[in-house]
Amino acid sequence: MRLFAAVLPSAQAVAELGLVVRKLGTLPGADALRWTGRDGWHLTLAFLGETDEALLAELDTRLGRAARRTEPFTVRLHGGGRFDGRALWAGVAGAIDPLRLLAERADAAARRSGIAMDAHRRYVPHLTLARSRTPVDLRPYVAELAALEGSPWQVAELILVRSTLPRGGVPGERPRYEPVARWPLGGGG
């Protein structure tokens, strides 16, 4: 199964971002982008990729430990950016150091569970809004996102998510995301 560790934005953050994305959708060329859906908005901490189910018990233990070792913290959506003209994203501000630490712990948990992870690189906290198969000038969208200043929310749990990619090539079809496990941060809850 295809998995990733994530943090989910609050309902208020999703509603606020929805208004911004609606405005972005009116910019020239917006119809050429593949927009992510509200139900799939998340901050990926560690992408595990295709994962053998035999590793899930160990992964559960290690991600649980990573969550317990991380106290809840507060973040907010702020600004935005792009990756190589192919991905548009909303940025994150607030307690970035604890968010990065949680991402590092999730990555380490996966590695120690026997999951072959991509080469380690510095975590860039973001929420992907749109993608393109070919390079696109995303600068007007990033300029519009500069004013994004979302309401803060408390990150209180680490979530393991299963990602099911679209199969039929149906226009507009998006990946489906299903929480597989949740762990409260700091051992609460």
Image (spheres, rainbow, N blue to C red):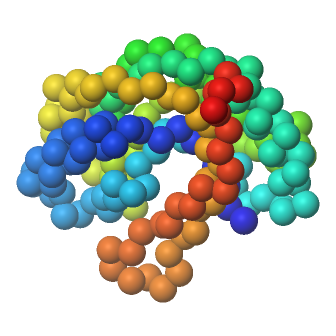
Q: Which residue is drawn at 87% across and 51% down?
A: 57
Position of the N terminus, as image quadrant, is bottom right
Q: Which residue is drawn at 54% across and 70% down?
A: 165
121 vs 17: above or below: above
- Residue 185 appears anywhere in the view: yes
User: Which is nearer the eye, 155 or 43?
Assistant: 155
> Which x, y percent locates residue 154?
45, 25
168 vs 82: above or below: below
> Which x, y percent locates residue 120?
71, 31
39 vs 47: above or below: below
Q: Within the image, what quadrant is residue 188 found in? A: top right
> Which x, y percent locates residue 5?
64, 43
Q: Which residue is drawn at 78% across and 58% down?
A: 51
152 vs 50: above or below: above
- Residue 45 appears anywhere in the view: no
> Which x, y percent locates residue 4?
64, 49
Q: In this view, does 128 lie to the left or right of 27?
A: right
Position of the C terminus, as image quadrant, is top right
Q: In this view, does 182 lie to the left or right of 55?
A: left
User: Which is nearer the eye, 132 or 41?
Assistant: 41
